[in-house]
Structures are given as structure tokens and as C-alpha cells.
Image (cartoon, rainbow, N blue to C red):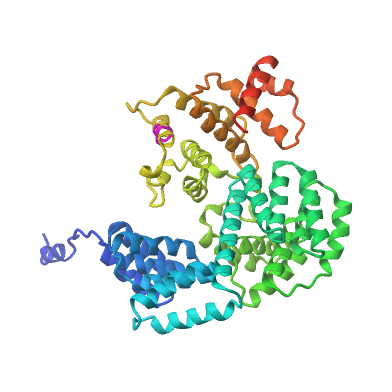
Amino acid sequence: MKKGSKTRAERTKILSFVPTGEYYFNKGMKAYHRRELNKALKYFERALQLEPLEPIIACQLSICYTEKGEYRKSNELLHDIISDLDPRMIECHYFLANNYAHLGLFKEAYKHVTTYLEEDEFGEFSEDAEDLLELLELDSDIAVDTLYEQDELIQRQDDARGLLESGNFERAVHDLKGIIEDYPEFWSAYNNLALAYFYQGKTDQAAETIAEVLSKNPGNLHALCNMAVFYFYQQRYKELDELVIGLEKIRPLLNEHRYKLGATFALIGRYHEAYNWLKSLQKSGFEGDSGFYYWLSHAAHHTGHHSTSQHAWKRVLELSPEKEGSEPWEENVDQLDGFENHTTSILKKLKSNYSEERLFGLFLTSVSKLQAEILSHADFCDIEDLSLLEKLYLAEVLNSNRDTTIQVMDEVKNIHAIALELYGHYQPINSVTSGLYLTWFTVAFNGLRDGYNFKNHRAFAGAVEQVWHRLRNEKITKKDTCEKYNVSSSTLTKYMTIVESYLV
């Protein structure tokens, strides 16, 4: 051995190092102070995974979420701190007030800012809290009770929009009709109702709803843009061209309307008009959501602005990582993986307020290539919050790809088998076909409460598909469905009756 080799060996000896929550927290703070928010977010998230009971880490992570504009995620953490980790962290009430104000939920903002000032009158954020309180009171030339009513409306609209985005069109229609009944001049609800009808295939009702908006509120830009989208998908190009001539002349002042106009132009393939609107918004400092950058990227790509397209797409992936793979420069975008391989979409469904959506989320988990990642994800649903049926279904999901001794009742196995039968014909699952699965899980949920066992898998799958097409006003013959699922016409008719009885 050469002289000095022992010394070198000692110097190069690898030491065992296990990073702690504090280690990642300190790295996060350094990144945060350098304004590297994406890095800071990753470090704080990792720190909280290692030390989930540390309120300081949770609070700093919530602040980072706020600066990224993810107010709801921030609020979830802040509420956890107040209720479980450290109720003495009064400053969380100020942070909550600030987030709710950004979301337009003034009742909640008012409640938390007054709580903060009552609990810590001379606290670190007392001056800012007083400014916020004054702003809330000045901004509302109306009584606080009226603000509360506005909060309720915003929350109901937000819930309905969530149902719409997740493909739960029946519930969305029901909720939006309720909003319109209570607030007959809330045009946003009408426009979302028209979209819900259109996604169901009820084009006549969608058109009637849009016509009602325009008769009562002429020139409503959202209604005109939705009508353009309807014409585009129905290939009514002559009517679309006439409408586009009018849309090209509109010069809206509000950023929201400029965004809607730009996104609509992008969706119907008028990329030059789309790029002009969306790029001008970006130049003015507009900080949009992932949808804004998605359409900007597509419009830029199709108009030859490739650098802008790539930079916008980078922003899309920061806000919505599940969209990776659907870049506008990729071919065969329509052939991409569906909801079943989008972790974020599945986690969102698992936290829905509706059982049929949670069951659908569990089914997506069962067929996902990312199953291990989903089951181990920090945002995976709390098992204790699931109903007995959902727990049993989760056990069946775990059984699907594992050699396990977990015992699952036959009825739950049948529910899963029927969903798999549908999946054999409808995959990958997209925003339209998700309605088929939600129809099935609604039937399954209601039927199981009556003790139905769902033994005939092919007959139920065929019946659900036939009923779903009929609900969407799509003409699919019983003969075609019978051949697809290898059942007789009388059997299909019998099971369609059962399916319809559990959709009431």
C-alpha cells in the first residue's frame, strides 16, 4: 500500500446521512428568501412529510402556497394547524383572512381577521390585519349579512364548477338549477348549466339556456363564447363563422373577459386571434391559472412563437404536473393516457363530497399504472373518512393486483367487475366518458343500499352504456349494444329498467 493511502481512505470514508425535517426546512427557507418558490415548496413539503406534527413547517408551507396563488391548499394547512397542531398560533387567522379575501370569500375573511385582532390586538400582523378589515368594510357598501350571502353564492358556484370539471354532469345540473332558482340573475350559473347540458349531449337544452341568457342579458360574453364552442363541436361552421365575425370586434376591458375570449379562439382553432389576446394579457402582468398558460402555449405553438409556447408550457407543468405529455408540439395528443394515469385527477376525486365520485376515484386507482404512487401519496384520502362501502371497495382495489387474504363481499367484487367490463370498451377515460363511469357508480351505490348483488356483469355494463347514451341523446341501437356485450335484447331491456330505477 502506498504511503498516505490510509489517510486518503479515512478522508473519503462515506458517512451515513439521514436528512431530517429541520434539514429540509432550512433549505426551504434559504430558497424562499432567494424567491425560488418552486424549490422552497418542494423542500417544505418534504420537511412536513418527515415531521407532520411540526406547526412551524406547516405554516411556512402554507405561506409558500399563498405566494404561488394556491390559496385553498394554504387554507387546508392553516385550518389543520389551528384545529390539531397548535391552536395558539393566532397568526394563522390573519393568513386565513388574507387567503379568503383573495378567493372572494369575504365572510370567511371577515371572521378570521376579527378573530386575529381579538386574540392578538398588538401582534406582529395587527397593522396589516386592521388595513384588511378596513378594506373589507370599505369594499362593501352593503351590510356584512349581504357579504355572507355573496360568500354562499360563490361557494355554491365553485362546488358546481368542481362537479362540472370532474364529469359529474347530473349533479352539476341539479346544483346549478338550484343556484338559478335562488339567484335568477346570476348569469355565470346559466352559462355553466349550458355547458353541463352540452357535455351530457343535451344540445337543445344547452342552446335554450344560452338563448335565455342572451335574451335577459344581451351581449353576455361568456354566453357568446360558449355558443361558439357548441357550434365548433357540432361542426356548424357557417354559424360559427358568423358568430366569430362578431367576437373579433369585441374589445373587453376586464381581464376575465379577455382571457375567456382568447381561450375560446384557441379552442376553436383561431390561433392568431387567441395568441394576440392571451399574449397581451401576459404582457400586462396577468397571472393566470394553468388553463391560461395551456391555451397560450397552444396558440403560440400554432402561430410559430415556439419560445413563448415552451415557456408557457413550463408554467403549465408547474401548476398542473398531470398535464405532462400533452404538449402542443406532441403528435397524437388525443391518444394520451386518460384520468386513470393522472395522479392529481384521481386524488381530487377521492376527496370529493360525493360517494359515487370517490368510488370512481378508487376504480381509477385500480387500473392506474401509477397505483403505487397514488396509494402512497401524501394527499391520498384519509381511510377513516371513507364509508364502509368505500373501504370495502378499496380492499377490492388492493386485491386486484396483489396476492392477499383480505375478504371482500361478493356484491363489491361484482361492482368492480362491471366497471372493468366497461373499461374494456372505454379507455383511456376522458372528461366525456367519465360520465359513463359516474353513471355506473351512482347505480351501484344506490343499488347496494337496497341489497342488490349485481351478478350479471355483461348485462349491467351493456344496460349502463345504453342508458348513458340515451341520456346524452346519442342514438345507439340495442342491437349494437347486445352484440358488444353478448346479451339478448330481452335481457338488456330488463337490466336497463333496473339501471334507470337506481338513477332516479
Q: Is residue 127 above or below residue 300?
A: below
The answer to whether 159 appears left or right of 52 in the picture is right
What residue is at 68 percent from the left and 48 percent from the top? 196
Q: Quadrant of the C terminus?
A: top right
x, y (%) of residue 50?
28, 58
x, y (%) of residue 300?
69, 65
Where residue 491 sits, quadrant-wise, is top right
Q: Toward the viewer: 379 or 137?
A: 137
Q: Is residue 210 visible?
A: yes
x, y (%) of residue 327?
61, 55
Q: Is residue 488 visible?
A: no
Where residue 93 sits, quadrant-wise, is bottom left
Where residue 142 sits, quadrant-wise, is bottom right
Q: Is residue 104 above or below residue 212?
A: below
Q: Quadrant of the N terminus?
A: bottom left
The answer to whether 490 appears left or right of 53 in the picture is right
Q: Toward the viewer: 218 or 32?
A: 218
Q: Is most of the magenta stretch helix, strand or loop?
A: helix
Per the rendered image, the range of residues in magenta is: 391-395
Q: Is residue 144 above or below residue 391?
A: below
Magenta span contains residue 392: yes
x, y (%) of residue 341?
52, 44
Magenta span contains residue 173: no
